[in-house]
Image: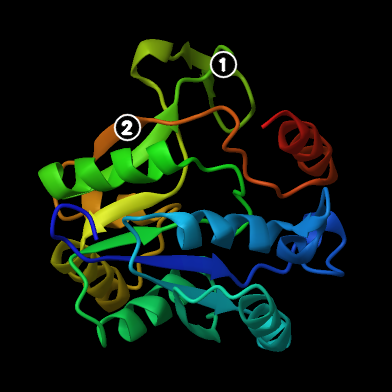
Amino acid sequence: MFQGKTVGVIVPAAGTGSRMGGVPAKQFLDLNGKSILLRTLEHFQRSDVIDLVVVIAGESEMDATRGIVSTYGLSKVVTVTRGGVERQDSVWNGLQLITKHTVDIVMIHDAVRPFISQDLIESVIAAAVKHGAAVPAVSPKDTIKLTNGELFVQSTLERNHLWIIQTPQAFQFPLLRQAFEKAQAENFYGTDDASLVERLGKKVKIVPGSYDNIKITTPEDLELAELIAKRI
């Protein structure tokens, strides 16, 4: 609970990990002695402000996911449920389940981002309580250019106004539910959860993220993650 607000987390973990070779799924890959998924869930288990967690798993990973939850005593995980066709469908499934609980704030976090900090969790929640919606982000280190369809540069974008968006993203529950209901009704799929809220004309607050908060989707990402795990 955060300032009297109940906080629930949805962790989409139904990806196949095709860029990793697919077997095992990337969330079950070993990262210095622990699976990526376990590392991620432990952050929410340890958090004083998180009340419950819903994990979304693929059809073939349901048993393995439940095994991690039971083996490591992840008591805040109230359910493991089946994912949808797309990530957004999986989160929607999670929202249907989370409505069974009294939740004020919903966080959504990628299962394969195992390096979140307690400070980041709390700062994103605090911003969502105040502003309705909040996402962590870091500024790009490289120059970003906009191209046309033939890969000729059209313009160079001003980095001071560009942000690389991460998770966990947090939202006041009624706002997030409204955003997903609109997206479902219009068959709209966004690249992240905040984009659905943006379509309502609502503001989304940026919170400083961390360059360590990487999303592990390629073998190169896993190599970098092993170095980060040793350092922190």
Q: How many badges with numbers are in the image?
A: 2
- Quadrant of the frame with the C terminus: top right
Is residue 202 visible in the rendered image? The answer is: no
Disc 1 marks which residue? 153
> Given the image, on which type of amino acid does mark 1 rest?
Val
Give the residue at x 64% y 25%.
151
Is residue 65 visible in the rendered image? The answer is: yes
Give the residue at x 80% y 43%.
222
Query: In the image shown, does 76 or 113 lie closer to the viewer?
Result: 76
Q: How far separated are the C-alphas under marks 1 and 2?
A: 30 Å
Please tell me the numbered disc located at residue 213.
none
Disc 2 marks which residue? 207
Q: Earlier in the sequence, mark 1 or mark 2?
A: 1
Quarter assignment of residue 67:
bottom right
Question: Quick one: SS at disc 1?
Answer: strand
Crowdedness of circle 1 by 10 Å Cα count: few (<14), some, many (20+)?
few
- Quadrant of the frame with the N terminus: bottom left
Left or right: 145 as drawn, with respect to 202 = right
